[in-house]
Image: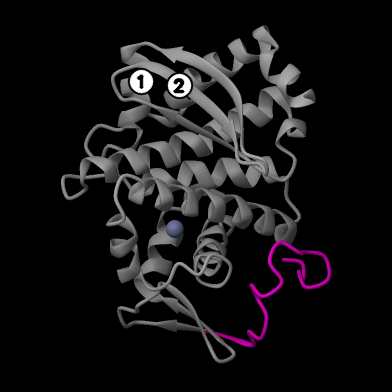
Amino acid sequence: MKPLDAQWDLHPRLFAGIRKVEVSEEAEERSVDVRDDVLVLEADSLRGAIEHAGTFGLVVPACWMVHELIHQRAQTLGVKADAQRLRGTGIGGETNLLHADLGADHAAARIVALAFDRDLLEIKDAQGRSLVGFPAGRHHSVPGWFRKALRLTSLRADVVWRRLHGPELLADGYVFVDFGPAGGPIALFRSGPPFGVLHIDSLDGTSATRLHQSVSAEDPTPIEAVDDVLQSVVRRSLESGRSRAEGRR
Ligand SMILES: [Zn+2]
């Protein structure tokens, strides 16, 4: 792992002042926290991140740790209990959490790619695949399931888009998607700034269900099948050329 301090500028306070790392066996208010000069990692959460790393090794727990640190130090989301309050703001609650996660995912992937001297695409691929280890179950609300499905699908759409289009329309941002579980329109956005539309397409019912079921604990759609659906959508965006023309405006 390379030292990061001189070359990264995504958030200047992210690692500032940290001198030691400790693992806590207690249930903590935050799964990753900075107290004085100590980075405290909650043991259960750390074990979960390591277990779901599969063949991708250390980059997955590294993405988790940086993602959580971004929640605290860059996004100031607060403690775990505050997520419940953020859900309670009305229509936007789960959507705001979704975008906090996607923003933290992207920044974490960039930092880990720099730290491990790996391609961003490789890290994003591992990050997206590792999310299947955190499926939605019966305890999730309908909006909670939607949030998880949109997060996983967005991470995969970002990888698929970068493979077919390259990164130039995204600048430092990333791709995310929105769609309904019964089919109909699917929109691919770039995060920006400025936020914008990359492509609008249609999903048949079967394809929409596949994407929506990607986070099912009992019968998940395999990642390859998720990618196939998204590849068809992104290929049609290449054919239309619409996204490229819009990017030049
Ligand atoms: Zn998060």
Classified by dominant secondary structure, the portion drawn in magenta counts as: loop
Q: Are marks 1 and 2 in contact (CB under 8 Å)?
A: yes
Q: Is residue 74 above or below residue 139?
A: below
Residue 221 seen in this snapshot: no
Q: Which mark is residue 16?
A: none
Q: Position of residue 224 (x, y in %)?
A: 47, 26
At a point 55% along the width and 56% down the height, the residue shown is 104
Q: Mark 2: which amino acid?
A: Ile
Q: Is residue 162 above or below residue 130?
A: above
- Whether residue 22 is in magenta: the answer is no
Disc 2 element: strand
Q: Position of residue 110 (x, y in %)?
A: 68, 53
- State how far apart marks 1 and 2 are (Cα): 9 Å
Q: Quadrant of ligand 1?
A: bottom left
The residue that label 2 is drawn on is 186
Residue 3, picture quadrant: bottom right
Which of the marked residues, 1 or 2, is nearer the chain's N terminus? Answer: 2
- Left or right, 120 with respect to 209, comes to right
Q: Specify whether tag 2 is near ligand 1 (CB below 8 Å).
A: no
The stretch in magenta equals 1-21
Packing grade of label 2 (10 A; few <14, some 14-19, many >=20) is: some
Q: Specify whether tag 1 is near ligand 1 (CB below 8 Å).
A: no
- Left or right, 143 with respect to 118, comes to left
